[in-house]
Amino acid sequence: MLTDVDKMAALEAKVKDLIKHSTGLKRRAVQLESRLREADAKLARHAADSRQREKEREWLRGRLRKVLGELELIEHREDDRHGGKS
């Protein structure tokens, strides 16, 4: 049979284990929060990069449409000069 001192020692050991475990969990939570902040920042950078690339693609599409339109005009002028379409 356990004495009161033994029971108190066992209880104290359990409390110390819980404190140790709690400290480890808090440390892990801090690490995970840090990783989450880093991931959020990385995601924000990627989203900004993606928006910038989309703007650049839209600009390029516009330029290509303009150049293609100009080429069509040149082609029509050439056709008109040579008496019709080929």
Image: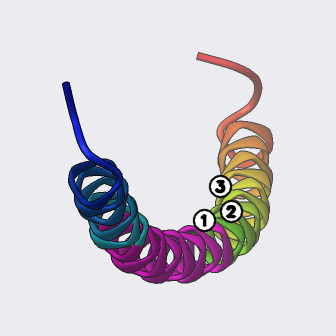
Q: Which image quarter is the N terminus in?
A: top left
> Which mark, by number, is residue 50?
1
To which residue does mark 2 refer?
A: 54
In depth, the one of 53 and 43 nearer the eye is 43
Q: Position of residue 60 (x, y in %)?
A: 63, 68
Q: Secondary structure at mark 1?
A: helix
Residue 44 among those drawn in magenta = yes
Rounded to the nearest angstrom, the CA distance separating label 1 from label 2 is: 6 Å
Nearer-N-terminus badge (2/3): 2
To which residue does mark 3 refer?
A: 71
| Front of the two marks 2 and 3 | 2
| Front of the two marks 3 and 1 | 1
Report the amino acid beneath label 3.
Leu
Q: Are marks 1 and 2 in contact (CB under 8 Å)?
A: yes
Figure check: 28 above or below 83: below
Seen at 70% across and 20% down, the residue is 85
In depth, the one of 4 and 57 nearer the eye is 4
> Which mark, by number, is residue 86?
none
Report the amino acid beneath label 2.
Glu
Residue 20 among those drawn in magenta = no
Residue extending farthest to the top is 86
Q: Is residue 53 left or right of residue 69?
A: left
Picture colour scheme: rainbow
Q: Secondary structure at mark 2?
A: helix
Nearer-N-terminus badge (3/1): 1
In depth, the one of 32 and 72 nearer the eye is 32
Q: Position of residue 5 (x, y in %)?
A: 27, 61
Seen at 46% across and 74% down, the residue is 26
Magenta-colored span:
23-49
Report the amino acid beneath label 1.
Ser
Predominant secondary structure in magenta?
helix
